[in-house]
Image (tube, helix red, strand yellow):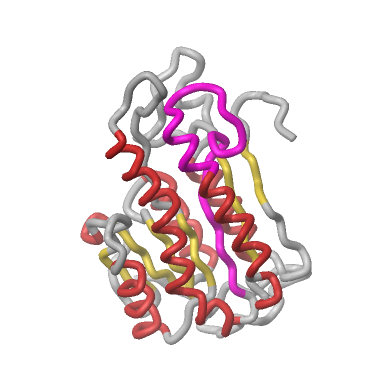
Amino acid sequence: MIETNGTDGANAQFGPGRLDPNGRVIMLSGANRGIGAAIARRLVDAGYRLSLGARSPAGIERNNDDNCLCQAFDALDPESPQAWADATVAKFGRIDGLVNNAGVAAAFGFDDGDEADLDRMLEVNLKAPYRLIRAALPHLRAAGTGRIVNITSLAGMRYKRGSAGYAMSKFAAMGLNSAARSSLWDDGIRVTAVAPGPVNTDMMPQSDAWTRDDVTQPETIADIVALVLAMPNNASVAAIPINAVFEPLP
């Protein structure tokens, strides 16, 4: 069972310059493995109530209880985001934050590649987060301190190597992040892109340049997400690029 302090402090300050997590409800996609599983563990420890979405919710570490909902979510199904948001509100009565973490990668270049793979990356990495934002939006507005965190990628901030199609989908996701940040600001909703490079998950590309110990760990990404969710309305961060190796990003 997940334990919290039992205090509903959704719009209160928790210490100097932080929002109290107790009572706040966060939707998290791709929660069954890798970065998503690490974020779920971190947010549970912080005291949030969680709505965890995955294609196979049975694989999510957490069990359904008073503080957690495990819900089927298929990023390729246009109806799935609204169904998940409705289930979240039915259980908790509110949505305070959304972490768009689910993502997919496939090889796609200019000399070769199947456009079906490109379409799938755009569906999962761009359109599914857009649909989830739309589904959660009335409740995020009602919260007054709604938070959206989009797990994007350094591949969406500059292109160096790898799948051009993946980079295209992540650049599009950064555009979504920027548009949402501007459009929803006056509603008290703060939007942040967390953009890591290689992370020690099963999606990490093979490379002779680094080992799994060299790259960013999922738990580090989770700490950053927890920080962003707790920041007050007057201290928003638009994007957080995360480097495992040095590169001169703007």
Residue 24: x %, y % from top left: 53, 76
Q: Residue at x 50, y 57 (%)?
A: 42
Q: Residue at x 36, y 54 (%)?
A: 30
Foreground pick, 201 / 233:
233
- Residue 243 within the magenta-colored segment of the rendering: no
> Which quarter of the rendering shows the C terminus?
top right
Residue 179: x %, y % from top left: 61, 59
Q: Is residue 95 left or right of residue 20?
A: left
Foreground pick, 2 / 48:
48
Residue 142 position (above or below residue 200): below
The total number of labels drawn is 0
Residue 209 position (above or below residue 114): above
Q: Is residue 122 left or right of residue 47?
A: left
Residue 163: x %, y % from top left: 42, 28
Residue projecting furthest to the top:
208
Question: Magenta segment range?
Answer: 146-171
Q: Residue at x 55, y 58 (%)?
A: 149
